[in-house]
Image: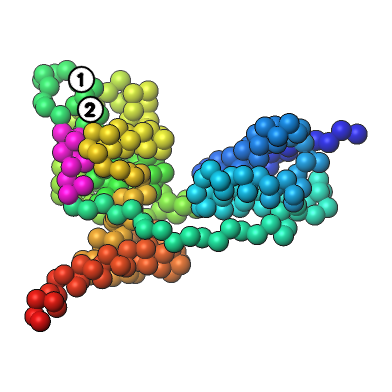
Amino acid sequence: MSSPEISDLAASFRRHLRAAGKAERTQILYGQSIRFFCDWLTAQGRPATLDQLNRHSISAWLADLAERVDIETVRTRLRGMRRFCRWLVTEGELDKAPTEGVEMPAKTEKPVRVLNDDELGRLIKACTVPRGRAGTFDRRIFDGRRDEVMVRLLADCGLRVSELVGLTLADGVDLDQELVYVVGKGNRPRVVPFGARTGQAIDRYLRIRSAHPYAKRSDRLLLGERGPMSADGVRWRLEVLSEQTGITDLHPHAFRHTFAHRWLSEGGQERDLMQLAGWRSDAMLSVYARSTAVERARASHRRMGLGDRL
């Protein structure tokens, strides 16, 4: 009897995750781990079948992966394979999970990307487009206003990119109260305030959004050329802004780190930050606080001017 194709079992696994109510992003990440492992087997001249799913092949794949990507990506791939293998055991497809004994690579401490005020100002300026002709839909103006809203909401509210693209007009944004209603991880809702300038940017964007071809076909706040903007669409627009401004390492999560850093630097309470960021445990707060602690200490030293008193 021939060994089952891993891709066929992966399709059943995806249905299991969906039935279990796992977040779409989690489903995608786990699916990627399985698919990339199968691609690696194929590149090795081996069939992507269940009999090839063993501890030796998984370890070899991860070692090869570690040569090409950062350690966090390797950890993510192993987490996906662990979950898949445990499911295979539960379903009776395997007697033992081949990921048992495969050690999780240790995390490496590296500086976290935090945008400074000058960089944020340059990004906002890059979104500004000269005013077009009244009564017409100008794609450049639309993209500029939308991108400013995108940048301001990421920086002002510390939203995850999935939360940003999920915002709707009907129940996602309240301009009068200056609030966004976010659905975070685990479908947990929360309310996050934004500043007057962010509200002004949203208001200006909404006026031109009404003329967008998809304006009446979608309730999503952010629209792209072919409909609602995706997380990948946001990442692509940030790449465009990166090229325009010369600001490197620009990605959505950098804004979330920047939000947390600025909040703590200005003396904001940690519990309030947990509420705004949608963290349910102290662990995530510790990660973000630790990652920018050196810069905050440096800024405090400058403000105190201890060296100037010598």
Q: Secondary structure at mark 2?
A: helix
Label annotation for residue 104? none
Residue occupying the point 41% across, 38% down: 231
Residue 155 spot, x, y in % from top left:
27, 50
Residue 2, picture quadrant: top right
Q: Which residue is mark 2?
A: 142
Magenta-tinted stretch:
118-128
The three-letter code of the residue at mark 2 reads Phe
Looking at the image, residue 109 sits to the left or right of residue 206; the answer is: right
Q: Main secondary structure of the magenta part?
A: helix
Q: Secondary structure at mark 1?
A: loop
Residue 302 spot, x, y in % from top left:
16, 70
Looking at the image, residue 231 sits to the left or right of residue 263; the answer is: right
Residue occupying the point 23% across, 22% down: 139
Residue occupying the point 21% across, 41% down: 123
The three-letter code of the residue at mark 1 reads Phe
Q: Are marks 1 and 2 in contact (CB under 8 Å)?
A: yes
Residue 35 spot, x, y in % from top left:
63, 37
Label annotation for residue 137? 1
Q: Nearer the viewer, residue 54 or 18?
A: 54
Spatial separation of the CA atoms under disc 1 and disc 2: 8 Å
Mark 1 crowd level (few <14, some 14–19, many ≥20, 10 Å Cα): some
